[in-house]
Image: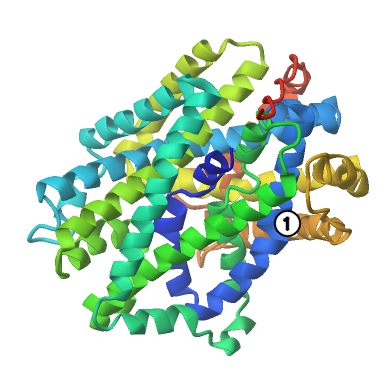
Amino acid sequence: MLLVMLGMAVGTGNIWRFPRIAATNGGGAFLVPWVVFLLAWSVPLLLVEFGMGKGARRGPVGAFAELVGDGWAWMGGWVVLCATFIMFYYTVVTGWCVRYFWASLVGEIPGAEPGAVWAAYAGSGWAVLTMAIGLAIGLWVVARGISGIEAAARLLMPVLILLVVVLAVRAVTLPGAERGLAFLFTPDWSALSNSRIWLEALTQNAWDTGAGWGLALAYATYARAREDTTINAFVLGFGNNSISLLAGIMVLCTVFSIRPEASAEIVGAGNNGLTFIWMPQLFAAMPGGRFFMGLFFLALFFAALTSLISMIELGTRTLVDRGISRSRAIVLLGGAAFVLGIPSALSLPFFTNQDSVWGVGLMLSGLFFGIAVLRYGVDRFRTRFVNSEGSDFAIGRWWNLAIVLVVVEALVLLAWWLSQTIGAEGLVAALDPFREWSLGTFLLQWGVALALLLLFNRRLSRRTPPVEAAEEPA
């Protein structure tokens, strides 16, 4: 089960986003708040999700209704809805990885013109096709049930970790790689006075550990009764961030070794620019670069696929909790994912809009988990669901404060991100709901979603029998 959980947490955010965010927010200085928020955000929320999943034996909607009260089922609905809307465009990212792995195999990249493949592919019908391929693989795995997901994790996760380690080792052996290591691991302590670095570090933890997404909760419904909640949460959090750190070493050592004169330009190119335009150029400049480029995009695809599988399982688990058969739930969810993923595949502005709206929406999910625990009673929750039977290490009263901090952190992040939508044109312009990035588009989409969830809360709160705990090993 731990490999399944790690597959949920480790995704493209570790390989695709972390190196750029770390590099553009102080390098070594960024790592300090990043580790702080691993303990102040990710681990506390993972403990909440493990506890709720094992305790309720239902997905987020049923878990909120069971543990907090029927009137709070809409909060669980938001958690599911937010992760599901992320899944719709995440299928597109998985497709990008499929396309670039194939391009690396046939020698189509890097090509004579940087970005030529990306320009011809992104937003085209080919992006829809590769999206469908990635989605079909994910649906096939989930259709086999938890045993299929565990089998996929046993194959994909060890290979993914091996690929990342091999690429990181190769990167640190490049001439001049020490510049990248020095940049990543030498903190400028004065930079810690910059509040943006702390906010970006908190955001990165929220996005790449899977804490607060409801994914760990969905998997925890299948856990054995004596599964160690505490160890799983800590191993998952630290294991995930270790993969991020290896990815940072891999990318930044390569950048500083191959193109030191353009390192600032490269790491500031954005996720798409760094991953799909610059990385092929960098690999091409190193000995054996085509081979290692293939490994890079294979690792990226595996990372995307393991996370996509967990999102599909979350949606499927929620529909099954509503009384729909698993096979029908997968068909319904797969059809919706394909149809609603097409706009993001064909339009990068639409993709960016959805990534922004629902990515920031995860902060609201984290807030709802924190509120649920406070309403249930922090001590009561910790005693009953965290320090439960099978836990070798008891969580102390520090966790009570951590949950309060989670609520505060979520509110601060929400306020900060929403304030970023108001530009020089002022509040009136920012309220335009049809812009790619605006306060109006956040408020409109969130408002419609929350209104519908509140309207149908009574129906959401209806519960089916809980999932049976997995059998203990003989």
Q: Is residue 2 left or right of residue 24?
A: right
**Residue lying furthest left:** 112
State the residue position of label 1: 411
Q: Identify the image quadrant of the N terminus.
A: top right
Locate residue 413 relative to residue 86 in the image: left or right: right
- Whether residue 156 sits left or right of residue 320 in the image: it is left
Tag 1, which secondary structure?
helix
**What amino acid is at disc 1?**
Leu
Q: How many marks?
A: 1
Local packing at callout 1 (Cα closer than 10 Å; few below 14, some 14-19, many 20+) is: some
Query: How far across and how far down the image is residue 445, in percent?
Result: 57, 38
For image coordinates 58% across by 43% down, the residue present is: 2
- Residue 442: where, in percent of width, then height? 57, 46
Say above or below: 171 vs 127. Answer: below
Q: On the image, which quarter does residue 253 sit in? A: bottom left
Q: Give coordinates of residue 32: x percent, y percent.
A: 60, 75
Q: Quadrant of residue 31?
A: bottom right
Q: Residue at x 22, y 76 (%)?
A: 258
Q: Is residue 214 left or right of residue 264?
A: right
Figure check: 74 above or below 113: above
- Camera sees residue 447: no
Query: In the rendered view of the protein, which quadrant contains the C terminus?
Result: top right
Task: Name the residue nearer the viewer: 209 or 194.
Answer: 209
In-front residue for pair 446/305: 305
> Is residue 356 in view from this perspective?
yes
Tell me which residue sits at (86%, 47%) in the image: 382
Q: Residue furthest front?
A: 474
Name the residue located 22 percent from the left edge and 52 percent from the top edge: 294
Colour pattern of the rendering? rainbow
